[in-house]
Amino acid sequence: MRKVRHKTGGFSLTMTIVCIAFVIVAVLCATRLYGVHSRKQALLEEQKKLKAQKQALVDKNNAILAQGTKTNDAKYVESFARSQLDMVYPGEIIFRTTGD
């Protein structure tokens, strides 16, 4: 007697399992890649915000340093003491007027 072989339609069980595994790996890689891309975008946005914050702090620091150099100027110190602290030299008299 002869053995009769039947064709199974082209794909064997092994080939089907390999294709399914390939699809699963491709989906997992695509999901992982999307997560990495989303994280990268979030980090770039955070980097922009931090750069802007850094620039604001540098500007504020420069203003404070400029203010510090003014405090070494005798005319500035005198005008600040007279206007803000109501200080006078000995012997000076302050006349205050009212709106009446």
Image (tube, helix red, strand yellow):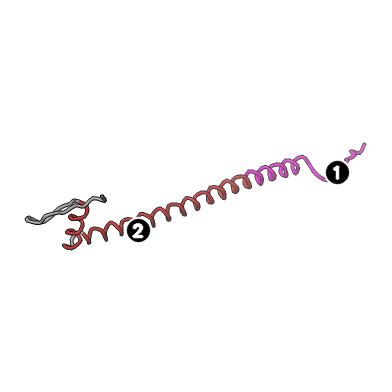
Tell me the residue at 59%/45% (across/down): 32
Residue 9 circle label: 1
The residue stretch that appears in magenta: 1-28
Q: Secondary structure at mark 1?
A: loop
Return the residue nearer the eye: 25 or 39: 39
Q: Is residue 5 magenta?
A: yes
Q: Vertical placement of 13 versus 71: above or below?
A: above
In depth, the one of 79 and 40 nearer the eye is 79
Residue at (72% x, 40% y) in the render: 17
Q: Give the amino acid type for the residue marked by disc 2 in the picture.
A: Asp
Give the side of residue 86 with respect to residue 29, left or right: left
Residue type marked 1: Gly
Residue 30 vs residue 10: left or right? left
Furthest toward the right, the residue is 1
Q: Residue at x 30, y 58 (%)?
A: 63
Q: Which residue is mark 2?
A: 59
As measured in the structure, the alpha-carbon distance from the residue carrying label 2 to the one carrying label 1 is 74 Å
Who comes first in sequence, dot 2 or dot 1? 1
